[in-house]
Amino acid sequence: MTRGKPVAGSGTRLVGAGRSGDFADRVVNPPVWRASTHLYPDCAALREGPKSNEDGRFFYGRRGAPTQWALAEALTELEPGAAGTVLYPSGLAAIVAALLTVVKNGDVLLVADNAYDPTRNTAMDLLKRGGVECRFFDPLDHAAYEAAFCERTRAVMLENPGSLTMEVCDIPALARIARANGAVSLIDNTWATSLGFAALEHGCDIAITALTKHVGGHSDLMMGAASAGERWYRRLRQTAQQLGHVVSPDDAALALRGLRTMGLRLERTAATALRIAEWLQARDEVLAVLCPMLPGTPGHEVWRRDFTGGCGLLSFVLKDRGDAARCRLIDSLGLFGIGYSWGGFESLALPFDVPPVRKVMAWPRPEWGVGEALGIRLSIGLEDAGDLIADLDRAFAAMNEG
Ligand SMILES: *Cc1c(COP(=O)(O)O)cnc(C)c1O
């Protein structure tokens, strides 16, 4: 397609993203190019190949082929401020590779204390072995955050909202403070995606998404992406090449297929999640509902200010119940699968306990005045809201009978 694209809403952008390449003008979707070897017409062309480190140039399979380039291009078009996007074999691989791009031996890395647990593990083990010192901070406490910077602070790892506990933080303020201290800010933006939160426009340098979740959307693929402006995009690419990261063209085609309907799925699952959050909030058995879209969640006003959408992932905390009751509730659900991951078309429930490794963010929250807070995370799928609420209602009854 060579026709110009007018400025458009997110649905229109999702339909058109990544479809301007040279390889798919006669069919709607790019073919699945399975390729390790790219052939050259002659030796002169072969010698030119490695000189170009650009996407969209054939060289060797590890640098991808048109299927992967179309996906990367689509994600770049959807991320305001991005010069390019690098794909990774998982969301975690994207986080680790982006961190390795930014930090080096002797640097200090600040990590939000409510970040995804595997991110924390990598920071505390792999990066530590590489001589990087990791310090955790409370992203809601700006004074303590600002005080945590030192000469050696090189980067800040953010996530919004926080994993499991869903606090929304003021990313523009945190990114501004990082920049003023000469540090690079990276954000795990998996919850909102670029549709719901334009991370680079809000001051971050590198925006990371686990495509496994909303982009894939069908619980059938693992992939990650990092998008950035010109400076960091070049270096992200270089690190990915040095690490040998590549994604399969079959998975890239699945991700592209998922991407086209992502806006619809996010809208629908966010609306259902909000209805469920309101329903949960009215239950006696529930101590707190943790859902950025629901007034009362820490940072809800910031969510309203900065986000253009939500999604179906929320958590809640049981009041005065033990683990046996929690498991009884979850095991009694008929429409929710029990499993990790989220963002699929099907609903999931997961018991969670906030890792005791959290260092600076108190849990349970002091204002609750309780000693223990047992959590349940729900990933809301495309089922009808009324059916999911009826299912939850039955499960609460089963818990109370037990
Ligand atoms: C799942 C998840 C990841 C990791 O993605 P994978 O593809 O499973 O490696 C990263 N960040 C967040 C917030 C996630 O929920």
Image: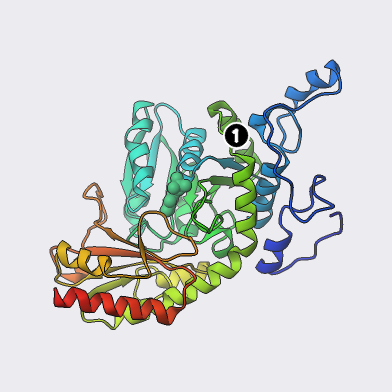
User: Residue 152: x percent and y percent?
Assistant: 40, 34
Q: Is residue 51 left or right of residue 141?
A: right
Q: In this view, does 103 lie to the left or right of 196?
A: left
Q: How is the image coloured?
A: rainbow
| Residue 285 visible in rendering | no
| Residue 72 visible in rendering | yes
Q: Is mark 1 on a helix, strand or loop?
A: helix
Quadrant, the C terminus:
bottom left
Assess disc 1: are there few (<14), some (14-19) or many (≥20) residues with their C-alpha within 10 Å of its C-alpha: some
Q: In this view, does 160 lie to the left or right of 68?
A: left
Number of numbered discs on residues: 1
Quadrant, the N terminus:
bottom right
**Is residue 322 depicted above or below 151 in this figure?**
below
At a point 29% along the width and 83% down the height, the residue shown is: 282
At a point 32% along the width and 33% down the height, the residue shown is: 125
Q: For the residue marked with disc 1, what is the amino acid?
A: Arg
User: Residue 29: x percent and y percent?
Assistant: 74, 53
Q: In this view, does 307 lie to the left or right of 319?
A: right
At a point 56% along the width and 45% down the height, the residue shown is: 226
User: Residue 245: x percent and y percent?
Assistant: 56, 33
**Is residue 233 depicted above or below 257 in this figure?**
above
Q: Name the residue under label 1.
A: 235
